[in-house]
Image: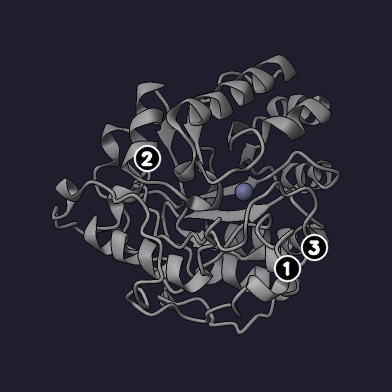
Amino acid sequence: MPVYTRRGLGAAVLSLALLAGCANLTSSPLGPGAGAPSTAAPVSPSAPTSDPWTPSPEPSATRPPRAASAPTRPPGPTIKPRPTPSPSKTTSPKPTPMPDPEPNQRTKPEPEPKSTPKSQPKSPTKSESKARSEPKSKAEPSRGKRVVYLTFDDGPSRFTQQVLDILNRYQAKATFFVLGANVVDNPSLVRAAARDGMSIQNHSWDHPDLSSRSNDEIRSQIRRTDNAIRNAGGGNSTCVRPPYGATNARVRAVLGDMDKRQLLWTIDTLDWERPGASAIYRRAVEEVGRGSIVLAHDGGGVRTQTVAALPRILENLKDRGYRFGTLCQ
Ligand SMILES: [Zn+2]
């Protein structure tokens, strides 16, 4: 089975993102009011990140060194082209209104010549490589207000309660994109999160690359997870974050048919690489602007660094006047 190279896929996704005008990657804005996609926080396309899941079973030999910054175009014919997103949306020129008051808005997360993460537990088969890179757009529902959306993926896990405790201490809310398989193992954490006012959303059953699955498999991944969330007391989820950010027109269409909104992110802390709490903190706060959606993980590996960084992140953002909102509720 073909393995995408991280950089190849990152570049491919980037190209697609450019083609699609970025914002289209997130096909469904939060709502009608979400008109102006926040392309302003272009998560560097050069951050071909992959999920914490990716690193696992693949012999490291197959894993190319992490591309610090992805070239803007696919390195060649070796790339397995992903199903292309509809070219139809190519052009909408995006206004880039998101007024970001922060001076330090960088376009690029530090290029880190990271070697390779190695945190992974159960990652299914996923071959490494799935890159996600997109500037996922999302126009914030609350424009004009200083709201930031913290999101935590791949849980619930043994770190989830710590994350909840910290969020509660700061009276902050967040959105958790959970895996159905983890939900059935930790239903009480889902219930606790919901009780704390967190938004519980769908990240698939066991973290496959949805873009390589059949429509039926995609539906099954989403439905089973929805049921698990509901049975655990997490309510009805309305959004899906495709694992690895791997999506395409077909995935979006299947999700759309299920009345699901696809939700990606705008700032990637790359916490799964375990770069140290300070690095996670910096990545989380440096590029933040109104409506930013920050990606971090409460599952999928050892998350002590994420937990350690969280209080500082919350303090920093709070000091700057941000509130912490939930998505998809
Ligand atoms: Zn994930």
How many other residues sit within 10 Å of disc 1, few (<14), some (14-19) or many (≥20)?
A: few
The disc, 1 or 3, on the residue closer to the chain's N-terminal end is 1
Q: Which mark is residue 308?
A: 3
> Residue 282 vs residue 5: left or right?
right
Q: Residue at x 56, y 19 (%)?
A: 236
The residue at which mark 1 appears reads as 59
Identify which residue, 272 or 317, lies in the foreground. 272
Residue type at numbered disc 2 = Pro
How many other residues sit within 10 Å of disc 3, few (<14), some (14-19) or many (≥20)?
A: some
Q: Residue at x 37, y 54 (%)?
A: 82
The residue at which mark 2 appears reads as 141
Q: With respect to residue 321, does 59 lie above or below?
A: below
Identify which residue, 7 or 147, lies in the foreground. 7
Residue type at numbered disc 3 = Ala
Identify which residue, 170 or 163, lies in the foreground. 163
Q: With respect to residue 76, does 213 lie above or below?
A: above
Which type of secondary structure does the marked residue at label 3 adopt?
helix
C-alpha gap between disc 1 and disc 3 = 30 Å
The disc, 1 or 2, on the residue closer to the chain's N-terminal end is 1
User: Which quadrant of the view contains residue 188?
Assistant: top right
User: What x and y, as percent, mark residue 257?
Assistant: 35, 22
Q: Nearer the viewer, mark 1 or mark 2?
A: 1
